[in-house]
Image: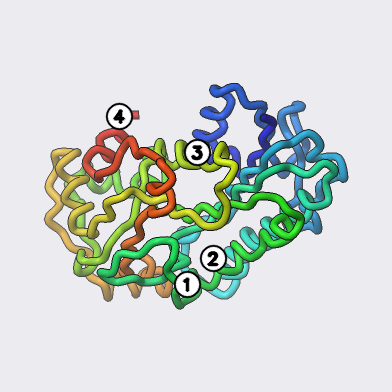
Amino acid sequence: MRIAVSAASGLIGTALVRELAGGGADVVRLVRRPPRSSAEIRWQPEAPSGGLDAGALAGVNAVIHLSGAPVAARRWTPARKAVLRSSRIQSTSSLAAAMAACDPQPEVLISASAIGYYGDTGDRAIDETAPSGAGFLAELVRDWEAAAAPATEAGIRVVNIRSGLVLSRRGGLLGQLLPPFRLGFGAKIGSGRQYMSWISLADEISAIRFLLASAEAKGAYNLTAPEPVTNAEFTKSLADVLRRPALLTLPSPVLRLALGEVSGELLGSARVTPARLRSEGFSFAHPDIATALHAALAR
């Protein structure tokens, strides 16, 4: 297969491109600068149809779209919210329109999404049948997924991958937590009772490849491990793996003062399960948090 990947240099994209190429796929990267080789295609995600020439995606069988500005990197000012929306919604809409305009069209679009779709689920375990939640992030994810409509309407198979926290020592939440935890400053957040839905980087990549190969797969899939854990459980597991104490607590008021509205994503609860993946036969290499953390730190 010839597969185009956006955000190919990101945490997930880098690992995915390596795995796809290792499996024999012809991978082309969507880049925002002039291409340096035939393995790159220039695009402008903020432009109509992604700034792609009519023949730019010629011969591409599948597109895996992972672009989006980091959600929790800074406070959610009105300007930052606009960036979060445009980096996801406009880019997805542009790419979907470009795919729809191709002749022949790519067969499938796998488009990044997030479990933020469900909002705060409390202690309740939910799967893909649950409705969308409330709040900025839930609204953002709803609109993000809807932006792929041009591809769907053109008859292209569209899969929205609602990822949880992707665990890797090279980045994401785990990458940020490792330095303080290694120094013995590990801390639970707020009450610690809020659920965290996570997935190892290896299982994230395997799930994307599984959905790419499954001709009947379409719609939303939760990319989360089968066993969500509370923040307190996650904190203890990470401290145990690192053999360091984690006796501190980051109080909720301090977090709200420091981060503003975005703190709700750390204090909220997301107990999300991967019902569709499991029912369709996907096997997790790292189904529990201890296994996943050991694997993440070993790679």
Q: Nearer the viewer, mark 4 or mark 2?
A: 2
Mark 1 sits on what residue? 132
Whole-number angstrom distance, CA of label 4 to CA of label 2? 32 Å
Disc 3 to disc 4, how far (Cα)? 24 Å
From the top left corner, tell me how far across and down residue 208 is, in percent. Answer: 51, 41
Residue at image position (40%, 41%) is: 281
Specify few, some or many for label 4: CA neighbours under 10 Å numbering under 14, 14-19, or 20 or more: few
Where 33 falls versus 24 (above or below)? below
Estimate the x, y position of residue 233 in percent, counting from the top left.
18, 54
Tell me if label 4 and label 2 are in contact, CB under 8 Å. Answer: no
**Residue at 20% of width from left, 57% of height from top?**
187
Which residue corresponds to mark 4? 298
As drawn, 18 above or below 100: above
Left or right position of 1 against 139: right
Q: Position of residue 250 (x, y in %)?
A: 23, 64
For the C terminus, the quadrant is top left
| Cα separation between marks 2 and 1 | 9 Å
Residue type (three-letter) at the residue carrying disc 1: Ser
Mark whose residue sits in front, 3 or 4: 3
Please give the residue where the numbered disc 2 appears in the rendered image.
141
User: Counting residues from the N terminus, which is met first, the one under dot 1 or under dot 3?
Assistant: 1
Q: Secondary structure at mark 4?
A: helix
